[in-house]
Amino acid sequence: MTAPIKNRFASTRRSFLSRSSVAIVGVLALPGGLAGCSSKIPPMIVDATPVNLTAWRFQTLAQLSEMILPTTDTPGAITAGVPQYIDGLLASWAKPETRKSFEAALDMLDNVASKAHGAEFIELGDGAQVSTLEAYEAACFGKDAYDKTDADAAAKAGYRGLKRVIYRGYYHSEVGCTQELQYELNPGPNARIDAPLSEVGRSWAL
């Protein structure tokens, strides 16, 4: 899949940063599923052993993260270790309700894929993954997405929270801070933190 297709779900990293009022610093606590995961052996998207998520959910998270923040002229979410970062947070930091909502979000993504294409998300080809994620994002961010009486309300809220953590995980990483952003340990007295993005090319990691 080409980066421009994947970036439908991220806009572009730099446009996200220029619009965002969130400081790329510090870990922000987010508020807090489905138990049945597939028994199939997933393709190895990330060669890592999760400590909290099942292997299938972990690989789903990895593919999702990479679609949101793909490899372009700078490394993507997988290279930055975002899946491992989130899995570690779920194991050592997250409240049980947060963990369940994130797991429910990943399971709902699989359910959307299965209903539309007869296979789970990471089993799909590139085009089917794109259309599945487009439909899923519309469901999670659309006008009816915040209806608390919806049976999928928890999963949709979980996805919204998970996507925020994917961004934060990436921009807290060494890759995100030093390759996607600019980092200067001692910028000196002449540092300009208010310079236009068009002038400096990349935002600063603060």
Image (tube, grey):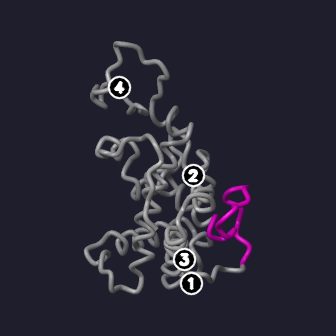
* Residue 178 percent coordinates (x, y): 52, 32
Q: Earlier in the sequence, mark 4 or mark 3?
A: 3
The amino acid type found where label 2 is placed reads Val
Relative depth, front residue between 203 and 45: 203
Closer to the camera: disc 1 or disc 4?
4
Q: CA distance from mark 3 to mark 2?
A: 19 Å
Instruction: State the residue at coordinates (62%, 58%).
Output: 92
Q: Which mark is residue 200?
A: 4
* Residue 172 percent coordinates (x, y): 50, 42
Q: Which element type, helix, strand or loop, lies under badge 1? A: loop
Label 3 belongs to which residue? 107
Instruction: State the residue at coordinates (45%, 51%).
Output: 167
- Pointers 2 and 1 in contact (CB under 8 A)? no
Q: Which mark is residue 82?
A: 2
Q: Earlier in the sequence, mark 1 or mark 3?
A: 3
Instruction: State the residue at coordinates (59%, 80%).
Output: 119
Magenta-tinted stretch: 40-58
Tell whether 59 sits left or right of 6.
Answer: right
Label 1 belongs to which residue? 118
The amino acid type found where label 4 is placed reads Val
Q: Is residue 46 magenta?
A: yes
Q: Which mark is residue 155?
A: none
* Residue 160 location, quadrant: bottom left
Relative depth, front residue between 21 and 122: 21
Q: Main secondary structure of the magenta part?
A: loop
Give the answer, above or below, for where 205 lies relative to 2.
Answer: above
- Pointers 3 and 2 in contact (CB under 8 A)? no
* Residue 182 percent coordinates (x, y): 45, 29
- Graded by Cα atoms within 10 Å as few (under 14), some (14 to 19) or many (20 or more), the crowding at tag 3 reads many
